Amino acid sequence: MKQLFITCWLLLAGSAALFAQSDTTQADSTAPPIRSKPKEPIDWHPKALRFGLDLAGPAQIVFQPTVRQFEAAADLQVHKYLAVMEIGQASFLYQPAQGNYIYSSTGSYFRLGADINLIKPDPKFNGIFLGIRHGRSRYVDRLFVFLPDENYGYGEQVLNLENPNMRDRWWEVAASTKIQVWNGLFMGYTARYRFGYRNLAEYDGQRPYAAPGVGRINGLNWRINYYLQWRLPFSKPQEPKEQG
Amino acid sequence: MLMATMALGLGRCTIEDCTSNFNDLALISFADTANQATTIMEVTWDSVFIMDADTGLYGNAISELWPLPLNPISDSSAFIFQNFNDEDGSLEDSDTMWLRYRTVERLLGLDCGVDISFRNLEVYESTFDSVYVADSIVTFDAEPNIYLYLLK
């Protein structure tokens, strides 16, 4: 593998010498040289920090009051790329009116990842992004079950189970938009597709049903967040110089 | 606005499968010791009950298959099989079997409820001639989990 790498570099270096000859040929020509616009060097300095909150989680409380999820997100703009961090806390409580169980799951999570802007630089910093995330969560889940007497001879019974130290990890592909709606204020959604989910904790017995950052483990792999974010530029945009 | 609505709606679009093949009744069958095969015998027991229980499971029954309910809040269950003398009602035959297993609990779905499965079933003590665990996972399959051998 190392030899292949060295060989490739030698071939690239050798081929560069061939292009040196073509410059002499152009100087001898009578036609004026075609001047191409010099490429601007890529500025790898961070441009801005954007941070804000997810609105979908709190809004979900209207439909499911016992599912609470709060998430903050931040991204650092470097050229057309974003370094992204999302952290949150979630709790799930399921107790059906006609059921014989109570399930709860409470904990926190985070996602780290990177996005690339798919459109040309926009003066208002709007963008359509595609990226990847790695997520981790840590939580406790509990299951309480009431078992009625089925006339076997065991009588009424109660199961009280807990997994105290659950840890999950997963990957996501994320597509998002960020639109400036007011001076520095951005809104936009992020659609995610989860894959590679795995529970890292050693446990026996009760299987987890819902996890922070994941939702229902055996549910849809798709999720959508809706963010409200504020952009803080690190420097003021440079005004064009006057020609005297 | 559309995306916000989708964000709220996606969370409820999970189709849950409420089916489970796991059962809480371990299927017991009896076979002839001399044969040491899995040819099921039809046997009669005057009484079959859970140890320390107030009620019986079977009384004066004859069958090839004996479903025995496992205790979901414990890792073991014990069952007593008895036959009585037809004339004076004295205890003629009594055998006991202790089963050990591992339970796995999972919420199948919000409207489905909790499924409790019994796995790693083993007979850790028995007064029968010998035992054979054919299937250590208790399911709705009609095949016996355990064969108990009787000297016929």
Image (cartoon, helix red, strand yellow):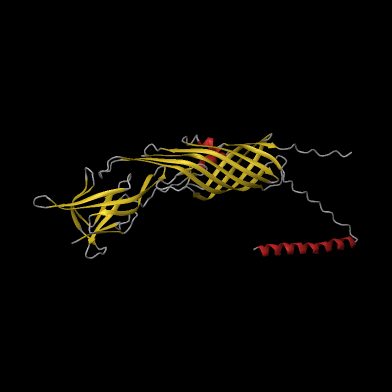
Farthest residue to the left: give it: B87
- Residue A84, by quadrant, is top right
Question: Measured along the vertical axis of the image, is residue B11 above or below residue A9?
Answer: above
Can the viewer see residue A194 in this picture?
yes
Count of labels in the image? 0
Q: Whole-percent x and y of residue B36?
A: 25, 64
Q: Is residue A27 left or right of residue A47?
A: right
What residue is shown at x 9% (from left), y 50% (from top)?
A: B88
Farthest residue to the right: give it: A30
What residue is shown at x 63% (from left), y 48% (from top)?
A: A130
Q: Whole-percent x and y of residue A174?
A: 59, 47
Can the viewer see residue B2 in this picture?
no
**Image quadrant occupied by the N terminus of chain B:** top right
Q: Is residue A160 left or right of residue A172?
A: left
Of residues A168 and A2, the one nearer the viewer is: A2
Q: Whole-percent x and y of residue B60?
A: 17, 51
Q: Whole-percent x and y of residue B118?
A: 34, 50
Of residues B36 and A89, the one nearer the viewer is: B36
**Image quadrant occupied by the C terminus of chain B:** bottom left
